[in-house]
Amino acid sequence: LGLLDALETPPHSTHSLMIARHGAVIAEGWWAPYARERVHLGYSLSKSFTATTLGILAGQGVIDLDSPVLSYLVDLDAVDPVWLRVTVRHCISMTAGHSAEAWDWRGDDVPAATLPAVSIPAATASVDCDPILDAIVRTRVPDGEPGQVWAYNQVCTYLVAQAIAAVTGHPLTSHVRRLLLDPLGGEGAKAQRTPPGRDLGFSGLHVTTPTIVALAQTWLDAGRWQGEQLVPPPYVAAATVPTPASLRAEGMAGDWAHGYGFSFWGASHGYRGDGAFGQFALVLPEQQVAVAITSEVEDMQATLDAVWTHLLPAVDAAVSPAADRQLAARLGELRHPPVRGGVDRTGEVRAVRNAQSQLPDAFGAVRL
């Protein structure tokens, strides 16, 4: 109840919350109009799904973590020699050697028809043309030594996604569906892709809250889901340890100062996958708790602080049946009230694209 109070205190805007202990969901709620079956953009939480899928494929011998990532994608004789030292492992841990974010494509400078988010099928034919990959190889050469330099960098995860697609003949999301989403319960999901149809890998995955808590539970159980070993234990052990390079990174504060593993962050308690604006898959081994949160907040640290302050001390506290009944009632009535005001909402409103907007030119106007 204290956690709900904190999550409903402005400027928090929480969309959903699921908490599991010992593998059983003990609390769940959605702030209407958000709902259990509704998919939610995970932003960079997508990376944790990519990393989990990579671990499964690596355990099957499909892809080698210590092979040059570009060995699956291009002729190595034609690239800068530093790329020969950038492995798949370096990319999934963001230690490829880039000292800063190297991704800056918005879509308007990528030739091809724009595609919407698409439902994730079991298998999809691969796409050969990838101007973004070509630009990465030519113009985003790492400026530091692979393994020694860490920077939060979307290019790294994009390369992992394309390597998986190249070695298997199917896009990353087809494996996310087959190896992860279906075993976790087959919940709905969508994926945003580049204009030529490539999976981003680092963002764009839309999933339900039950899928997020199931991901966290799988990692809490050392890669097992309902008795089945999905992710190899050695990969789980490696993925959850922050790299030395990430721990040396400057400018990181709060829970982000605890370093970065294989697309999972260290934390004050346990570790986590997270995405912009407060999308969380929290793994808390000491308490045997998994938490999923979706939201739209600017201060993500405040959300984590609320969990540390209110949830953790309540684990193993004395049981209060009255409080349990109050909690159940409140979780069933969560909602975001609609905006009210004196504006006439019966007519039509048209807004034209601002000349300074960074959206692609195709977004010329909107009509409501």
Image: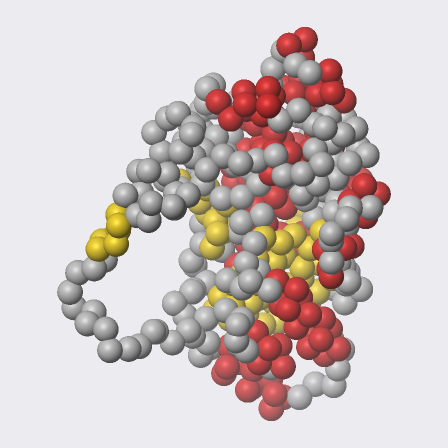
User: Residue 93 vs residue 300: left or right?
Assistant: right
- Taking the spot 48% from the left edge, 22% from the top edge, the residue there is 131
308, 123: nearer the viewer: 308
| Colouring chosen for the image of the structure | secondary structure
The residue lying at 78 percent from left, 36 percent from top is 149
Residue at the image position 63 percent from the left and 46 percent from the top:
48
Tell which residue pokes out farthest to the left in this image.
347
How far across and how far down the image is residue 138, in percent? 59, 19
Residue 20 lies, with reference to residue 79, above or below; the image says below
Numbered marks: total: 0
Above/below status of 73 relative to 290: above
Vertical side of 218 occupied by 244: above or below: above
Q: Residue reaching furthest front?
A: 356
Q: Residue furthest top?
A: 77
Residue in view at x 70 percent, y 48 percent: 264
> Where is residue 5 drawn, in percent x and y?
57, 80
- Asked if one can make out residue 48 in the rendered structure from this viewpoint, the answer is yes
* Res 119 seen here: no
- Quadrant occupied by the C terminus: bottom left
Q: Quadrant of residue 168?
A: top right
User: Residue 143 lies in what quarter of the image?
Assistant: top right
Question: Which quadrant does the N terminus fall into?
Answer: bottom right
Of the pair 26 and 312, the residue shown nearer to us: 312
Residue 38 position, x and y percent, is 42, 58
Across and down, in percent, residue 289 comes to 70, 65
